[in-house]
């Protein structure tokens, strides 16, 4: 009932910026939490950031705090991830996810996932 589509990935130089978008469609009113996760080669899926629609509370992994900003546009049913001061270690496939509960960091608590968008940061 909910579909998520990520966009905005690409190749960027270290120190540069990139903005990812996640467009939600379907029964979007059922979503309480929207989050971003990432997965690098040979690594597990890692929490990046999350936002609660009702309160606009935001949460960040320590590794990205101060560099990344998550935001949402309710009218457009779209969540964004602004990534600044990018580092080579940020290279990964980034996934948008949605949860019907007040989930934050646990991937298993999310109900819907996008297909991912590749972010590559060159040194």
Image (tube, rainbow, N blue to C red):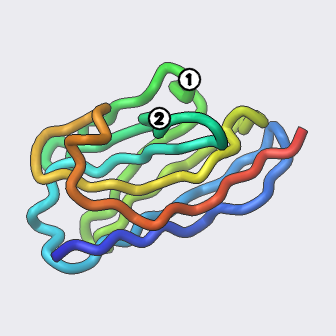
Location of mark 1 (residue): 63
Of callouts 2 and 1, the N-terminal one: 2
- Residue most extreme to the top: 62
Mark 2 → mark 1, Cα distance in angstroms: 10 Å
In the rendered image, residue 62, in percent from the top left (x then y), is placed at 49, 20
> Between 12 and 119, which is closer to the camera in this rendering?
119
Tags 2 and 1 touching, CB below 8 Å: yes
Is the N terminus in the top left, top right, bottom left or bottom right quadrant? bottom left
Q: Which secondary structure, mark 2?
A: strand
Choose top left, top right, bottom left or bottom right for residue 76: bottom left
Q: Is residue 81 left or right of residue 16?
A: left
Local packing at callout 1 (Cα closer than 10 Å; few below 14, some 14-19, many 20+) is: few
Q: Residue at x 52, y 44 (%)?
A: 38
Q: Which secondary structure, mark 1?
A: loop
Q: Using the image, determine if residue 74 lies above or below residue 88.
A: below
Local packing at callout 2 (Cα closer than 10 Å; few below 14, some 14-19, many 20+) is: some
Q: Using the image, determine if residue 73 lies above or below residue 14.
A: below
Choose top left, top right, bottom left or bottom right for residue 90: top right
> Between 45 and 10, which is closer to the camera in this rendering?
45
Location of mark 2 (residue): 46
């Amino acid at each position: 009932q909910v579909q998520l589509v990520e966009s905005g990935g690409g190749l960027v130089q270290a120190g540069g910026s990139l903005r990812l978008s996640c467009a939600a469609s379907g029964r979007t009113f059922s979503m309480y939490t929207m989050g971003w996760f990432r997965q690098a080669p040979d690594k597990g899926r890692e929490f990046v950031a999350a936002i609660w629609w009702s309160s606009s509370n935001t949460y960040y992994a320590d590794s990205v705090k101060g560099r990344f900003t998550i935001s949402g546009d309710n009218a457009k049913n779209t969540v964004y991830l602004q990534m600044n001061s990018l580092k080579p270690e940020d290279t990964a496939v980034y996934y948008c996810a949605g949860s019907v509960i007040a989930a934050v960091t646990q991937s298993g608590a999310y109900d819907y996932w996008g297909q991912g968008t590749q972010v590559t940061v060159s040194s």
